[in-house]
Image (cartoon, coloured by chain):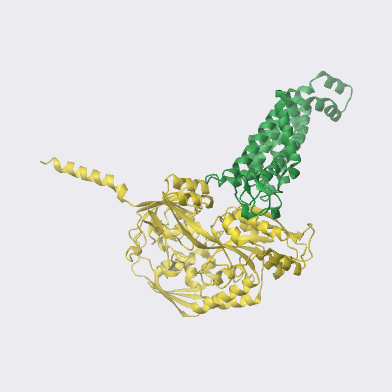
Chain colours: A yellow, B green
Amino acid sequence: MPMKTPRILFALLLGLALHLPVQAADLSIGLAADVSSLDPHYLNVAPNIAIASHFFDTLVTVDADSKLAPGLAESWKAINATTWEFKLRRGIKFSDGSELTTEDVVFSLNRPATLTNSPGPFTPFTKIISGKQAVDAHTLRLTTSQPYGPLPLDLSSIFIVSKKAAENASSEDFNSGKALVGSGPYTLLRFKRGESIEMARNALWWGYRDGRATQWDKVTFRLLPADGPRLAALLAGQVDAIEGAPAADLPRLKADARFHLEQRISWRTLFLQLDQYRDKSPFITDANGKALEKNPLKDARVRLALSKAIHRQALTERTLEGLGVPAANVVSPGILGHVAARKVEAYDPDGARQLLQEAGYADGFSLTLHGPNNRYINDDQILQTVAQFWSRIGVKTKVETMPLSVYFGRLRKADFSIGLLGWGSLAGDFALKNLVATPNAAEGWGAWNWGQYSNPKVDQLLHESLASVDDGKRRKLAEQTATAALGDTALIPLHHQIATWAMKKGLRATPRLDEFTFAWQFRPE
Amino acid sequence: MAKWRGLALLLLVALAVLVAPWLAPQNPYDLAALDIIDARLPPFSHASNGPLTYWLGSDEQGRDLLSALLYGLRISLLVGVGGSFVAFAVGSMVGLWAGYRGGRSDALLMRLADLQLSFPALLVALVLLALLGPGLSKVVIALALSQWAWFARLARNEARSLAGRDYVTAAHLAGVGEIRILIRHIWPNALPTLLTAWPVQLAAAITLEATLSFLGLGAPVTQPSLGLLIANGFQYLLSGQYWISLFPGLALVLLLATLNAGADRLAKV
């Protein structure tokens, strides 16, 4: 019966075709921020980094708990105070089949400095590397211009691209996929700007050999920055999971058996930065609106009073609806430089008033508090709540909020007297170098210390801490630095943010300390 | 009697707004009076500290909604009246001048008005606020600048038809100066038409202010007007905390409805 075979074959094929969509493991995730470019060296912002991590690898990676782990480099060590040696894994292939060598690594480390029109360059991570020597195809030696402990951590931010594909490529070539040749777990299918990014499993990825297999054949990231539509997409089943589940809707999601939530304290800490260098700060007057002789924020007693006036428990429970924990540090628990012994400043309005009186401000004063209104969880409300607390101790506080794009520019120009900032860092000394070290543009110190807090003891400790290549010693020094700076109320910590992922029933996820959303965090229950 | 109901309601709202500071249980703009512990309480809740009852509930900062509503109405009316008044004054002056003079200044001014009218008022206001920065006085300016053209067009048509009247020609022949003719003969006769148009633009100005505040560009966050209150409650709507958006929304609808009813009545007088 010669006719039978094709029919059976056809039936088999049909069956296979019908089954395929069910067997193929697809995942779609709603992201809370827009992705502006797929060029992994163009703009140093979290949403772009999250997507780039799917296409590219780094020499060193950080795991869900933000501990360093081998990436493309299977091992590394400091040969002396300024020289590091990295051993690459063997047989790593780019998605075009070519082999990844130290030549590609050197090219990738050089590339950020060539993108001179980047509004947020990756050069802070590469600036300190003064020498790059490819000893052979799998051994790389890097020299730093001065002793620098956090180099491996910094390298976890530099993606390795294919020299062949990326040489002379523009950022547009990455967005179109032409230059997007990486060694990461996924390859690009489509980038619809402002809408979605579709990617497919990269069968050549080295991680499969290591048992780091990811489950998903096809992953779609939908860009849904607005809370309402993102939540609606999850409720309607258009996406399987979302990051940044809106605070107001958590009780309802928790009660709904169709969904599952994963939460964890993230690395992002929110704090207030204070103008501590101008004698006449632009937004500070006395209680009646007249100019003050001197800037009260220069007085450590006033800074402490402002900190004591804040009821952090009420702030996190009511204003943040539980999506934060009161903070006494600038980095989250578990991160190098977090001083566990530091107690959260207790709510003490009487003590605060007392301190103001001692400092000569018995009648209080007036100020305007500035911050973004679209960056952190309930950011504009946090500012209003802080204003509420300060008004109670006689510090008349006004609030002005603005979109992030405007806010950051003005903040770095020191247009404000007090500003809200959130900072995610994997090392306390690194964070403090940016936030409280005496500003020095040439060395990249105090890049975000617009209020110009300056304390020689803190600077000294920071230098020692960042220069230590010994982890134990560095940890101790980083904690001493934090204790010195925070004991002086160099800034006012508010809370550590809690990150929330919501997903449909049947999915589970490993929440990451650094708030990133990666496809491989998700798995079937 | 029924005919006057709209106007009576309008007067009642105006009165409530005038005496808001004495009527409101709390000063919602005094941050020291708020208590974050009382945030997002449903209607009829009692304050955790103190004798206050939140008749309409509280917002996400623990602000009494009834008080916030009364104060918010005040801001909405004040900004709306201010903005539309400036627009009225500027627009009618420009329009009367253009209509009476005719010729080149007419062409120039009216093309300018046409240009302005070809953009939606909201867009014009958004651009202006982006340039001017935040603050209620800036909103008044933005409202005035996005509405003057409407009055200018109307005034110009009025002036155009009045300019041909016999008494104007007579005044002209008698040697009366142009400015004097405008002020004594044209302006008083154009005024009734312009005045009836004003409440319509007032309602539009209030809506525009509410929209701008809803988008976070109007009133400062610590002094929420109706639009900002609605925006603040927006994120809680899905989770069942309806009162933060609902009551300010109703107040805005009520204000606009009474304004229209009152204006209707006025137009017939």
Q: Position of residue A316 (x, y in %)?
A: 57, 59
- Looking at the image, residue B35 lies above or below residue B248: below
Give residue A210's quadrant in the image: bottom left
Q: Position of residue A429 (x, y in %)?
A: 56, 72
- Nearer to the camera, A168 or A438: A438
In the rendered view, does A320 fall on the left or right side of A153? right
Q: Position of residue A35 (x, y in %)?
A: 49, 53
Residue B58 seen from this side: no
- Looking at the image, residue A250 lies above or below residue A363: above
Residue B233 seen from this side: yes
Give residue A100's quadrant in the image: bottom left
The total of numbered circles placed on residues is: 0
- Looking at this rendering, what residue extends furthest in the top direction? B166
- Looking at the image, residue A406 lies above or below residue A71: above
- Nearer to the camera, A147 or B26: B26
**Which residue is at a point 60% across and 74% down the rendered structure image?**
A483
Give residue B177's quadrant in the image: top right
- Looking at the image, residue B146 lies above or below residue A77: above
**Which residue is at a point 11% across and 41% down the rendered structure image?**
A2
Q: Position of residue B204 (x, y in %)?
A: 67, 35
What quarter of the picture does the C terminus of chain B occupy? top right
- Looking at this rendering, what residue extends furthest in the left direction? A1
In the rendered view, does A37 fall on the left or right side of B87? left
